[in-house]
Amino acid sequence: MKEWLKKWRNPLLIGAIAFLLCFGATLALLTDTESKNNVVVLGNVKVKLTEDPYEDEQTVVPGQVIAKPPVIHNTGKNDAYVFVELSMPKAKVQMLYEEDFTDSNGIVHKAGTLKDTQPAVQEIFRTLISDTTKTYVTNTPDIQYNKAASAQGWEFLGFGDNTNSKRSYWFGYNCKLSGKDGDNEDITSPLFNSVQLKSFIDEDIDDDIARSIGVNVFAIQADNLELFATEPEFLTQAQLQDILKVIQNKKTELGEINYE
């Protein structure tokens, strides 16, 4: 199968975040945040990413939940497997307790007081799902996602980059998206439903630094992959990882992809 790489860029979704934190004196900081969305395809497929009803140019305060459900649509004629690299921004901050908390020694920590004794590099957003069953990446409760159960859904496949500015997570959809039939597009369930800004003090950070949540989509043509003796209806985590290796190998062959 002849494969090639093409890239579509979705417009940047830009919002304003007002950090209104109370600890001793009131700290009021204004920082930009971006949502960087890129779509990369292998083979003769075409997909798009939507996050409705996410709106740009919003003012967000710590603890506020913002609807931002990433959904992938197959807009082409061929079947495709789809993956997401979720990139969460990090910064050197001191987190605050977001609600009253009693520790193992019986000490009550009031909401709005310092949780960290020293600034540390850590993720400043969390993802949330609306389902009452909390599914999250192992040992990472701030990254919740809509996991595959007995039918369609997402599987966590592994960690990606982990630097002082971001940490990334790989997810795969456990069944192929069928090619577009007339006006009907096959779509995924949302990877997650919303995002939330954590409560923290960031007085040591340059306000000009952009904080971005990256939702990078990868799609590969389902036909002629020749990875399975019999094509399954629902793929296991291991099978999705095998397909992802094909994408990552092709990415290496064609050169590193630069996200803007």
Image (cartoon, helix red, strand yellow):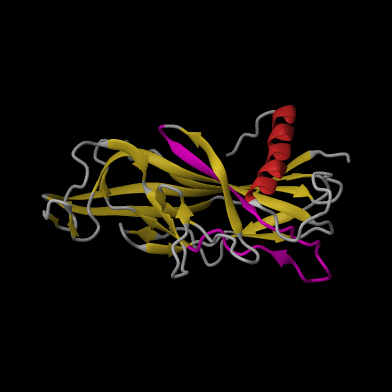
From the top left corner, tell me how far across and down residue 97 is, in percent.
22, 54
Q: Is residue 190 left or right of residue 197?
A: right
The residue drawn where x is 81% and y is 61% is 179
Q: Is residue 210 visible?
A: no
From the top left corner, tell me how far across and down residue 22 is, in percent.
17, 54
227 versus 52 height, above or below: above
Magenta stretch bounds: 164-193
The residue drawn where x is 47% and y is 69% is 131
Q: Is residue 132 magenta?
A: no
Q: Is residue 183 left or right of residue 190?
A: right
140 versus 253 height, above or below: below
78 versus 114 height, above or below: below
Q: Is residue 145 left or right of residue 44?
A: left
Q: Quadrant of residue 204?
A: top left
Instruction: Report the number of discs.
Output: 0
| Quadrant of the image containing the C terminus | top right
From the top left corner, tell me how far across and down residue 158 is, in percent.
55, 42
The residue drawn where x is 18% and y is 55% is 112
| Quadrant of the image containing the N terminus | top right
Q: Is residue 180 magenta?
A: yes
Magenta segment, prevailing SS (helix, strand or loop): loop
Q: Quadrant of residue 256?
A: top right
**In the image shown, does 35 or 159 lie closer to the viewer?**
159
7 versus 187 height, above or below: above
The residue drawn where x is 24% and y is 40% is 203
